[in-house]
Amino acid sequence: MEALLDFAREPLFRFCFAVMVLGLLRVLVLDLINLRQAYRRAGDKSVPWKRTIVKSLEWFVPVKRVFNNRPLYSLFSILFHVGLLLVPIFLVAHVRLWPQVVSDWWPALPKFWSDMMAITTIIFALLLLLGRWLSRASSALSRKQDYLWPVLLLIPFVTGLICAQTSVNPKGYQISMLLHVLSGNLIFILIPFTKIAHCVLMPMSQFVAAIAWKFPPETDEAVCATLNKKGAKV
């Protein structure tokens, strides 16, 4: 068990993390290339930069939109994402695993607050799953991965909480830690190839929307030719 845990923590973790970073870079580069091509082909190259930046900031801090539609569900979703990001990045046990040059100055959450945030993240994830399942509109649009992702994201939080308890026996700790590390590695591998890749695309979403509807100059003629209406009077 110890050898398997060491393998999961060291070479397997490095491999999965590298796949995630390289995969997200690939997604980002391809999206930037497509965005540049769309801009070059656009008939109208003017971009409302100020409005686009404001819209992007509103997506990052969606305070205005949270109470517009399903306010309780939206609030749970925001709090879930906050815990999902803060706990792994600022957990003391995770910070200590980083190189000393980073861990010496990187801020870490006290154990009490990291435990509380982990518990609330689990609760909000379960509430989101319940809300998605009970809502006809959400369940009709949901795919399998919309249910599987929250469950998969719950595993490292639940197992991490178990490992943080001093009353866990050594065997239980090893099993929980192995599940914790393996589930985290699996998440790293899946991120670039699923909808979770939006974590790197979201900052550009409003710029894509601002450019996407600026059709090339020849679009009108191409549409008319396709519809066999070329030369027809409007």
Image (cartoon, grey):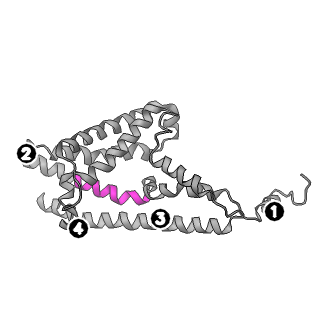
Decide which of tag 2 and tag 3 comes sooner along the chain. Answer: 3
Local secondary structure at mark 1:
helix
Q: Position of residue 56 (x, y in %)?
A: 51, 52
Disc 1 marks which amino acid?
Glu
* Disc number lying in front (2 or 1): 1
Q: Which residues are magenta?
A: 180-193
**Dot 1, crowdedness within 10 Å: few (<14), some or many (≥20)?**
few
Left or right of 18 in this view: 146 = right
Mark seen at residue 11:
4
Task: Give me the C-alpha separation between circle 3 and circle 1.
Answer: 33 Å
Local secondary structure at mark 3:
helix
Above or below 71: residue 51: below
Q: Position of residue 41 (x, y in %)?
A: 68, 68
Local secondary structure at mark 4:
helix
Residue under pointer 3: 28
Decide which of tag 2 and tag 1 comes sooner along the chain. Answer: 2
Residue under pointer 1: 221
Local secondary structure at mark 2:
loop
